[in-house]
Image (tube, rainbow, N blue to C red):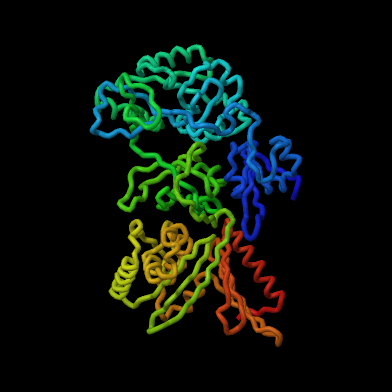
């Protein structure tokens, strides 16, 4: 495999240690890998390497790209010595959110730019965390030697492209699409009115790639709301309000307020949910985790390219939402982009990504007791264990009573309700779920009745139960007399081999993009494995290949 290369935008998967599978990508000359060694290097993303990239591209190609000091698995640093790739965070003025109790009359008002915050220290750009942005010499040659606070801005609704340019070590001509929009002069000790005039004067001599940010005086609340509506209608993010005659200060201050209809926040990518319909074979939603451990899905806001190559596990991303539910879950979340200058302060989460090539293992148990059919599934995905128990009741009243008892058992065990119950519709004739947004109420009941076995994964079950909602919902729709029909709903086939030396069975089930096999000695429950594929066609091809292999070895279908 050594000595190959990837075209711009191309990805490939490589095997890591054990069962791990990692994705390599070339994004306009920026090579990345989803392995922990690449993700956790303290270096700009276009100055990182790892053993997987070196094995794939070859040592010579990686050394030529990064320089002779780039060692496998080590952090790669720029040769610049002045405030290297990461230095001290600049003393930036940060905003609070506007509260309606604050009268905005007389405050300075400007559009909140959807770009990358940049501090010009007189020599180069630095992010809010101290990471250097490597702008070309021609971009900064006319900027002053005094500090300026502003935004590297590529236009409205172009946040992700802006990020893609500023994070590169070799952005070159791509920087022509950006402007450094200046809105303050941190080293000037005068009031804001004097500082913005200084910015206007400096930018008039700073060339084509710098401009000062226009501010107007807000008349009243109605004026603020009118301007906010105008900016948002143009695709802008919101407004910034600056108290008149205020001084520049380091840290978060009530003299600077942000005004938006939607809120922004950061979260960690802990999983990828496979898409369906027009998004089949690519990303359907990101599973995100907040710093307080709350997990939720974001399925909107992605471009086609981002769905084809989503942010890797462990990436810090920005999302936009309207409000928080009573359980602390963001409502109407929308993906914005990868956060390149953010700092994760939450716990280190367990992550899983079935859509990006990972595997999960599902073991299924069934029985009929007291006229009721019961199904138990144990599923492992990454380091997560989920247990689902589905019991089919004869009447709705019996189901309601069992559900209330299960809820009471879970609450008595110290759990708290996480989010609201969500419905999953399914076609009873085919027993297949038509929505994968969440587990059904039957799956919720199963989690309740099995809390003692799955307590370690209670907070993460929302990320893992969705993929198994179909099978759970299908089981809950069956009656004791329909057991045989239910067992064939996912095209299950059984083969046996009894040649005097061995007495074995092998079963295979095709369910959409998943192929499940179960095998063992006759008379035992055996063991099972489920593998997910990008498309149903690929799953069908794998199904047919495995059947041909088994029949070629003498297995006969029963």
Q: Is residue 489 above or below residue 40?
A: below
- The answer to whether residue 435 is above or below residue 129 is below
When the figure is inspected, residue 463 is found, relative to residue 52, above or below; the finding is below
Quadrant where the C terminus sits is bottom right
Camera-side residue of 23 and 92: 92
> In the rendered image, which quarter is residue 549 located in?
bottom right
- Image coordinates for residue 240, horizontal then vertical, percent: 36, 28
Q: Position of residue 96 (x, y in %)?
A: 34, 33
Rendering quarter of residue 230: top left
Q: Residue at x 56, y 70 (%)?
A: 509
Q: Is residue 12 left or right of residue 292?
A: right
Q: Say whether residue 468 is visible.
A: yes
Q: Nearer the viewer, residue 400 or 120?
A: 120
Which quarter of the picture shows residue 250? top left
Q: Is residue 144 left or right of residue 230?
A: right
Q: Residue at x 45, y 30 (%)?
A: 156
* Residue found farthest to the bottom: 500
Q: Position of residue 246 (x, y in %)?
A: 33, 21
Q: Position of residue 117 (x, y in %)?
A: 47, 30
Going 34% across and 28% down the picture, which residue do you hit?
A: 256
Q: Compared to 93, does 472 lie above or below?
A: below
């Amino acid at each position: 495999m050594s000595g190959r290369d990837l075209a711009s935008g191309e990805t490939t998967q490589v095997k890591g240690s054990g069962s791990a599978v990692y994705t390599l990508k070339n994004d306009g000359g920026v090579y990345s890998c989803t392995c922990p060694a690449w993700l956790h290097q303290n270096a700009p993303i276009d100055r990182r390497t790892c053993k997987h990239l070196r094995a794939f591209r070859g040592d010579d190609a990686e050394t030529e790209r990064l320089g002779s000091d780039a060692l496998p698995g080590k952090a790669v640093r720029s040769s610049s010595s002045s405030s290297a790739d990461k230095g001290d965070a600049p003393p930036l003025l940060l905003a609070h959110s506007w509260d309606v109790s604050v009268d905005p009359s007389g405050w300075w008002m400007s559009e909140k730019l959807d770009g990358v915050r940049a501090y010009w220290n007189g020599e180069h750009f630095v992010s809010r965390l101290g990471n250097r942005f490597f702008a070309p010499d021609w971009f900064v040659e006319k900027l002053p030697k005094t500090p300026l606070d502003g935004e590297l801005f590529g236009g409205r609704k172009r946040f992700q492209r802006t990020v893609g340019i500023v994070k590169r070590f070799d952005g070159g001509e791509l920087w022509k699409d950006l402007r450094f929009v200046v809105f303050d002069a941190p080293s000037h000790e005068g009031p804001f009115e004097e500082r913005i005039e200084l910015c206007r004067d400096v930018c008039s001599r700073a060339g084509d790639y710098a401009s000062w940010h226009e501010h107007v005086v807000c008349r009243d609340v109605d004026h603020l709301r009118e301007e906010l509506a105008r900016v948002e209608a143009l695709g802008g993010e919101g407004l910034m309000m600056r108290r008149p005659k205020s001084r520049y200060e380091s840290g978060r201050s009530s003299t600077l307020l942000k005004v938006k209809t939607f809120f922004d926040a950061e979260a960690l990518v802990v999983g990828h949910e496979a898409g369906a319909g027009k998004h089949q074979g690519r990303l359907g939603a990101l599973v995100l985790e907040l710093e307080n451990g709350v997990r939720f899905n974001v399925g909107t806001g992605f471009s086609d390219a981002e769905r084809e190559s989503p942010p890797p596990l462990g990436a810090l991303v920005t999302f936009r939402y309207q409000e928080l539910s009573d359980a602390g879950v963001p409502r109407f979340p929308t993906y914005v982009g990868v956060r390149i200058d953010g700092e994760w302060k939450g716990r280190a989460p367990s992550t899983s990504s079935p859509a990006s090539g990972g595997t999960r293992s599902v073991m299924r148990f069934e029985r009929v007791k007291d006229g009721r059919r019961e199904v138990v599934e144990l599923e492992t995905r990454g380091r997560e264990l989920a247990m689902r128990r589905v019991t089919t009741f004869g009447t709705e009243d019996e189901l309601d009573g069992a559900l209330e008892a299960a809820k009471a058992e879970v609450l008595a065990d110290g759990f708290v309700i996480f989010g609201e119950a969500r419905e999953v519709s399914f076609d009873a004739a085919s027993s297949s779920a038509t929505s994968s947004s969440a587990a059904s109420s039957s799956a919720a009941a199963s989690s309740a009745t099995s809390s003692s076995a799955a307590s370690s994964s209670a907070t993460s079950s929302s990320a893992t139960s969705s993929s198994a909602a179909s099978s759970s919902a299908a089981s809950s729709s069956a009656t004791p007399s329909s057991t045989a029909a239910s067992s064939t709903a996912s095209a299950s086939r059984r083969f046996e081999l009894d040649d005097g030396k061995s007495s074995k069975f092998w079963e295979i089930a095709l369910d959409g993009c998943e192929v499940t096999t179960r095998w063992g000695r006759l008379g035992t429950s055996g063991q099972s494995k489920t593998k997910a594929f990008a498309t149903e066609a690929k799953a069908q091809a794998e199904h047919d290949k495995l059947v041909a292999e088994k029949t070629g070895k003498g297995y006969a279908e029963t």
